[in-house]
Amino acid sequence: MVTAPPTHSAPLPRDRPRAVGRRESWQVAGGLVLLMLAILLLFRTWGVWVGDAVVWPLVLATGGGALIWRQSQGAEVVDAPLRERARPGGGAGRPRRGLRLARPSVGIVGLGAALIVGAALVFLWLNGALVPDRDVTLAVLVVVVALTLILAPWWLRLVRGLTEERAERIRTQERAEMAAHLHDSVLQTLALMQKRADDPREVAALARRQERELRSWLNAGSRREPGASLAAALEAAVVEIEDAHGVPVEVVAVGDRPLDERAEALVAAAREAVLNAVKFAPGAAISVYAEVRGDHVEVFVRDRGPGFDLGAVPPDRRGLRESVLGRMERHGGRAVIHTRPGEGTEVELVMAP
Amino acid sequence: MSTHRTSSEGTGPLPRVVLVDDHGLFRSGVRAELHGLVDVVGDAGAVGDAIECIVRMEPDVVLLDVQMPDGGGAEVIRGVTPRRPAVRFLALSVSDAPDDVISIIRAGARGYVTKTISGPELADAVRRVAGGDAVFSPRLAGFVLDAFAGPEGTGRAGIPSGDAELDQLTAREREVLRHIARGYMYKEIALRLGISAKTVEAHVSAVLRKLQLSNRHELSRWAVQRGWVDG
């Protein structure tokens, strides 16, 4: 068996430690083989012996197998750190690996294979199985065992290599998908923003839309299904308004519940309230806050616009009355508008059982 | 009422600030926005540099990015606090993911604002943190309400005893957080609730303390719950 160079040897010159180490390990291996031989011969003269026909082929096969197996395992070990180093560089990990695989040292493997085949032949010969009319089963069995010993390491590596290749392919696919996505979305938006650089409002709207899109893509899976819950529906409604009017609206939702008919009415009313804020408080910050506690749902739509006198609602603000207050009352909820000139407006929507 | 600056603006020395963010472009942007509003005494783009810079400059407030290589903002807080316990941190992030927000607060930040905040608002937040208060954005207030959702106010069935006080928000604290989430400023909240602005700030600081010390499992395991499992 080939072992590592002895650790107590003198420090080796830095530039050629490998070559020296290899020669030394061969010497160690040779010594070991001779030692084993001596012990075996000793056993033989003492009579502690199963028989020449079994022991010698066994020794040969063990040596050959050890050589081949060590070769294949050793290559793996050398490979691993190489791959680790290549990965952070991104993309460079792949071609190297193929090179490493194709280069197990042929001499050692050949020697191992020859030893095993030789062992098989010696075994058959010593048992007289090579004579044509003797036991064919035994001959076939021995050949199969020999072949398995020789081929198993390769087969193992093939399987391992395939698994890794599949993982690598998945990684590459994900990368390609990501690149395609960034190309379709972020790069397009950046190009558009450069073209519209003279229109800050448009640029801000573009940036915000892209930001939201990218966030939802990054958080894919953890996000709520659109249309499945109240908070998701509310967010979707606000997003639609943001996109259509280029106005940022901050949504904060606490708790959530499934979207039923009343929740839909609530979302529709909130949507109208936001639209109203967009219309009558241009340029002011708008925030939406929704809180769900069991069956009790509250939504606040607030803007920091000019506000107005509730007692003297101008005719063009009747929309708020109809589409917000009316809608809420029809579904068993209520809506309150808090506003005063100069203090912004807050629409409070409550849906309680 | 329509402006929401604090009265401290323009009085006294400007708070000394160190900026920590791994994006140079963003650092220079914030620097320009805060010019004249706070005194930016240094900036850093990596965790190691940041710790060294903060320890050397001893600023009042550190504006801290949450996501950076080598451990992020939390690592900076862990590196600085043992040596300069007086330095206060305000997290400034593009991320609105609950676990990012909660984890930086639990690491010791005294507030959390998003990077889309305007210059004057950011300066105001810095001043507030420098004065020892906590700064909650509407979104952070929402997260906290979500995390402490459950038995309300006095009734506390189902909560394991021990740090029950830490695991619960009082009705008043909830009310204050709700107003923050609705987009109200502290002064407006004080007016609406009929309490002083100082009291509002005290409530927010108490919430921050609970947020940092509570063992509610919602705070440590954010990603899992976030829905209406038990309706």
Image: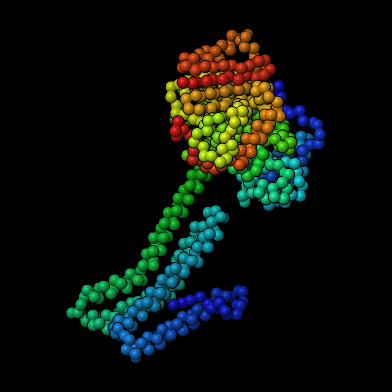
Image height of A341 relative to A296, above or below: above
Q: Quadrant of residue B18?
A: top right
Vertical side of A290 occupied by B213: above or below: below
Residue A124, position as x, y percentages in the image: 27, 80
* Image side of residue B136 versus residue B38, left or right: left
Q: Residue at x 61, y 10 (%)?
A: A313
Q: Tell me the residue at 78%/35% (across/down).
A: B36
Residue A271 in the image: state x and y as whole percent. 53, 22
Residue at left offset 72%, top offset 50%: B83
Name the residue located 27 percent from the left edge and 82 percent from the top edge. Answer: A125
Residue B46 seen: no
Task: Please tell me which residue lies in front, A332 or A111.
Answer: A332
The answer to which image quadrant residue B113 occupies is: top right
Q: Quadrant of the C terminus of chain B?
A: top left
Q: Position of residue A170 (x, y in %)?
A: 45, 50
| Image side of residue A97 versus residue B125, left or right | left
Between residue A135 and residue A40, name the one nearer to us. Answer: A40
